[in-house]
Image (cartoon, rainbow, N blue to C red):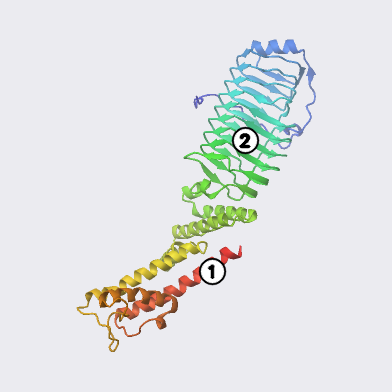
Amino acid sequence: MSPETTEPTPPAPTADEDRDDASADAPIEDVASVDAGSLAKQILAGTGRFEHVDCAGVSLAKQRVEGALEFVHCRFTRLDCKKTKFAGPVTFRHCRIEDSAFSNATFEGPVLFEHCQIALRRPWVGLTAKATFAVRSCRFEGKTTFEGCKFHGRFDGWDSRVLGWGDFVRCTWDGECDLRSMHFAEGLVFKGCAFAEDVLMRGASVQMKLAFEQTKLGGTLDLQKAKLHDYTYLDGLEWGERATLRVWNAILRAVLVKPNQIAGRLASEREGDFGKATEEYGVLKTNYAGLNWFDEEDWAYYHMKRVRRLARARAGEGGFTGRIARTADWLIFDKACAYGTSPLRVLASSMLTIFGFACLYAIPLFAASDVSYSTLEPTGYFHPYRITGVPRLDGVITCGIGSASSFVSGFDGVDKNVEGWVALALTVESLAGMLLLGLFIVSFSRKVIR
């Protein structure tokens, strides 16, 4: 169950760029050794604040700790918090925690690790955080693993650095998972996890692979301005109904995700920000081109052009003439050829055009009282070829032949003994045929060459 909004929040960050000790890399100095048993008793007794403490072997295993705890400039070795329940807020500032265990610990209040150095040999197993769990501007040494953890509140990893691999296995988040500006010196893997809300990785840096394996996403995966230097595996991500993606200004080495997984899921497009959506489709196009996934590149290119037209329409560019140009763009380049990415669509458009004009040419045949094979005088219809011996039926067939000939060869390819609007329609069809044939050559060549 998610925590109520009235719960206490972690203390605000106290980072100060002018202080040497504000960095997680600064050594923990001026600490005094304290007996482990004595310190454990003070903690269990409810003493809230500890400063400049150096202690090894403190055991709070299977205990319940009441009240708020705050540790500042402390060094802990072999801190045992297995199955410990913390009822109030817990804060570690400018601390170093080595070879300690938080397996199956429960934090009922908010938790804050800030500017800490964390070097655990053991994974964080079975941890439950009922409120905000924050590790801000911390340094994790070696491999960092969270396994079977439940975060009912917000997970905040702002500006922390993981010097080894980062693994999250079978973890669940009811609130946001905020990994903004985090740096992973190796890789980051989510396996069998579930996110009910957003995963924020804006500005994060991952040197090796980023993978989501058998993981469910319920909110937004925000990769804006992220620097992903190796392969990113999104093909194992299960996208929920509300799940969306943001990749604006992201540096993507190679993202493995199929268009059918993210079609209609760009958050910017759903929000109507078509300018940003244009740039994001451009990022995806570049990504697919680098992978030599040409069909997927065409998909991204088509949507980039489509939302760019929508962005210009929303901005009202060009006034009345701009609207006319965008209408022609929509009809000719979008619907007829998918911006040169689909020769089959051009072929279908060509067949539809030929059929439509053939039906148009057949109208005078049915309006005429008598259909003649004679070509001596101009008429308002095509003079039928002798095919079946039935003048009107032959006229209909001739309309189809004439339409195809006009489409392919222009006005010179048909009977010129016509008058009225039929002659004008032949001219229009000839121009349409010239345009569509050109588009077919371009789109077909583009497919074949690549």
Q: Is residue 173 visible?
A: yes
Residue at 39% over, 69% down: 353
Between residues 376 and 58, which one lies in front from this camera angle? Answer: 376
- Mark 1 or mark 2: name the one nearer the start of the chain: 2
Q: For this view, does 121 lie left or right of residue 336?
A: right
Between the C-alphas of marks 1 and 2, the distance is 43 Å
Location of residue 358 with respect to 268 vertically, above or below: below
Quarter of the image with the C terminus in it = bottom right
* Residue type, label 1: Val
Q: Closer to the camera: disc 1 or disc 2?
A: 1
Q: Which residue is mark 2?
A: 190
Instruction: Name which residue lies at 30% across and 83% down.
Output: 419
Q: Tell me which amino acid carries mark 2.
A: Phe
Q: Are marks 1 and 2 in contact (CB under 8 Å)?
A: no
Q: Which mark is residue 101?
A: none
Q: Residues within 10 Å of mark 2 (few under 14, many from 20)?
A: many
Q: Could you say whether the residue bearing mark 1 is in a helix, strand or loop?
A: helix
Residue 105: quadrant of the picture: top right
Graded by Cα atoms within 10 Å as few (under 14), some (14 to 19) or many (20 or more), the crowding at tag 1 reads some
Image location of residue 141, percent across then percent down: 74, 31
Q: Which x, y percent locates residue 174?
A: 53, 30
Query: What residue does disc 1 label?
Result: 442
In the foreground, 171 or 185: 171
Please give left or right for residue 371 compared with residue 32 in the image: left
Question: Residue 185: image x %, image y %?
Answer: 72, 39
In screen coordinates, is 25 left or right of 60? Answer: right
Report if residue 180 is visible in the image: no
**For residue 40, side relative to residue 278 (left or right):** right
